[in-house]
Image: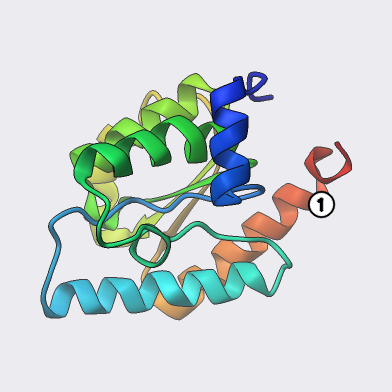
């Protein structure tokens, strides 16, 4: 259960309408064909989660281009992460930003579903070893099947959770 929000958090949550959101790792300074591939993957995840009538916070979609790094960090780490019902951690592109947000989610007691490609398992295991709020881990070989399994895990989380009734 997350801590009660502060007045500032409430104001910013209402201003930016970040309620019942989920997090996927930020892609800081990430450009080119590989970025397009990841953005496409994240968008597919967004579509899958939306089909469950949930809202996924996708930084590459929701963060305005004119926000500087400090504003992005402050809004995402101080408002979005603490207001999450569930955080999704994609370990395929580990970054310092993602690690900080993952640790913030852990400190806030936010449940986390970790997901990543099988070939990254050794690398990601180090990042998630002490993750006490992990409720599920999905290791996949095929993106389509990985997204299906992620959708199933999110649906299971909400089926077994009282979050929607609060």
- Residue 124 horizontal/vertical position (percent): 28, 44
Q: Residues within 10 Å of mark 1 (few under 14, many from 20)?
A: few
Vertical position of residue 68 compared to residue 45: above or below: above
Q: Residue 62 vs residue 127: left or right?
A: right
Residue 64: % across, % down? 34, 60
Viewed as shown, does residue 49 lie left or right of 101? right
Res 151 → quadrant: bottom right
Q: Which residue is mark 1?
A: 159
Q: Position of residue 86 (x, y in %)?
A: 60, 43
Vertical order, 89 against 63 (above or below): above
Name the secondary structure under disc 1. helix
In the image, 43 versus 134, the foreground residue is 43
The percent coordinates of residue 115 (x first, y second) are 43, 54
Q: What residue is at 85 percent from the left and 36 percent from the top?
A: 166
Up the image or down, 71 lies above or below 106; here it is below
Q: Residue at x 36, y 71 (%)?
A: 141
Of the pair 70 and 102, the residue shown nearer to us: 70
Left or right: residue 9 compared with residue 63: right
User: Residue 98 vs residue 158: left or right?
Assistant: left
| Quadrant placement of the N terminus | top right
Q: Is residue 125 visible?
A: no
Q: Tell which residue pokes out farthest to the right in this image.
A: 165
Colour setup of the view: rainbow
Which residue is pictured at 67% across the width and 20% down the height?
Answer: 4
Can the viewer see residue 12 in this picture?
Answer: yes
Tell me where residue 50 sits by quadrant.
Answer: bottom right
Front-lying residue, 14 or 128? 14
**How many badges with numbers are in the image?**
1
């Amino acid at each position: 259960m997350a801590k009660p929000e502060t007045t500032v958090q409430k104001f910013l949550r209402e201003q930016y309408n970040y309620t019942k959101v989920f997090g996927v790792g930020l892609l800081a300074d990430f450009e080119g064909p590989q970025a397009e591939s990841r953005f496409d993957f994240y968008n597919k995840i967004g579509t899958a989660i939306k089909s469950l009538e949930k809202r996924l916070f996708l930084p590459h979609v929701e963060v305005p281009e004119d926000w500087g790094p400090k504003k992005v960090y402050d809004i995402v780490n101080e408002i979005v992460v603490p207001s999450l019902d569930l955080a999704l951690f994609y370990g395929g592109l580990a970054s310092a930003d993602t690690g900080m947000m993952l640790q913030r989610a852990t400190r806030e007691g936010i449940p986390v579903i970790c997901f990543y490609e099988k070939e990254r398992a050794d690398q990601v295991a180090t990042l998630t070893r002490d993750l006490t709020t992990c409720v599920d881990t999905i290791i996949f070989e095929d993106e389509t099947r990985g997204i299906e399994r992620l959708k199933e895990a999110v649906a299971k989380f909400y089926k077994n959770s009282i979050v929607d009734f609060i």
